[in-house]
Image (cartoon, rainbow, N blue to C red):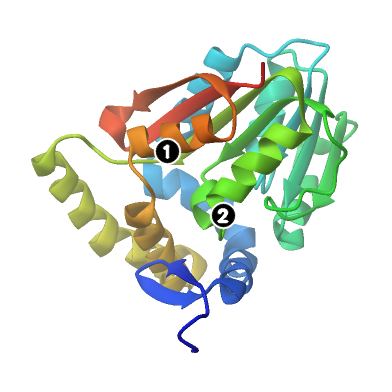
Amino acid sequence: MSDDQKTTHFGFQDVPEDEKAGKVHGVFTSVASKYDVMNDVMSMGIHRVWKDAMMDWLAPRPYQHLLDVAGGTGDVSFRFLKRGGGQATVCDMTASMLEEGKKRPEAQDAPMDWIVGDAMNLPFEDSTFDVYTISFGIRNVTRPQEALAEAYRVLKPGGRLMCLEFSHIPNDMLQKAYDAYSFNVIPRMGKIIADDSESYQYLVESIRKFPDQDTFASMIRQEGFENAAYRNLTMGIACLHSGWKI
């Protein structure tokens, strides 16, 4: 690696920036068929409560068009439509994740599009969407600040950003207990359920490398979003961020 080559983190590893996307793609291609099952097992089903909390705060409307980035198998998009949203576009860099989503019974005849695309270079025109969501995905983006800039670009004036991501527990003892669970249990679950411990080791490490709540809120403001706010979920294990394009 040359001295002037930019690097980023892939879990706890430092890798060239231009290699991270491929490595992340490999992780999610590997786990696609078991992704929804593993989400339930890893979080003991609590990820469903977090996504419902996102919908509660968002309060979808029938006229709204959602862009769900890193949307995977469509979990958030299906909730958005069920709550009264009008249309959803799921965008993910991993085609196999989208294919798994299309197999879900609720995908049949739903007003949804499934698009392969990069969060840092979205294949959409400016000012297209009413709502932009990204759930447990922005920590996997090579340059999250660029993803936030793209979110701002594709939102209509008056549009809203909502980001659900793992975060930091503001209590050292609880954080240590959570770390012990994450590093010792989750990769083993990945081995048993998905026959892939390494991908889940990366996912645990990537959570620890993501900025804390206040730092990420400042990143959202930096891209021009107004009224930026966040709500901790389950003691800060996850955090829901909101911002508006005014």
Kind of residue at disc 1: Phe
Q: Is the residue 202 above or below the residue 79 in the image?
A: below
Q: Residues within 10 Å of mark 2 (few under 14, many from 20)?
A: many
**Residue count near mark 1 (Cα–Cα under 10 Å), binned few <14, some 14–19, many ≥20:** some
Q: Is residue 192 visible?
A: no
x 71%, y 58%: residue: 93
- 110 lies above or below 226: below
Q: Which of 69/200 is in front? A: 69
Choose mark 2 or mark 1, whichever is in front: 1
Q: Are circles 2 and 1 on residues that touch, CB within 8 Å? A: no
What's the distance in space between the residues labelled 2 and 1, CA to CA? 26 Å
User: Which amino acid type corresponds to the residue marked 2 in the rendered image?
Assistant: Tyr
Q: Residue, x 43% and y 60% (percent of image)? A: 203
Residue farthest to the bottom?
1
Q: Residue at x 46, y 40 (%)?
A: 165
Nearer to me, 78 or 170: 170
Q: Position of residue 228 (x, y in %)?
A: 49, 21
Q: Which residue is mark 1?
A: 216
Q: How many marks?
A: 2
Which of the labelled discs sits on residue 35, or is there none?
A: 2
Q: Is residue 140 left or right of residue 46?
A: right
Q: Nearer the viewer, residue 185 or 23?
A: 23
Q: Quadrant of the C terminus?
A: top right
User: In terms of image quadrants, where is residue 61?
Assistant: top right
Q: What secondary structure is marked by label 1?
A: helix
Q: Is residue 231 shown to the viewer in this render? A: yes
* SS at badge 2: helix
Describe residue 233's horizontal placement relative to residue 90 as left or right.
Answer: left
Residue 139 x/y as whole percent: 49, 51
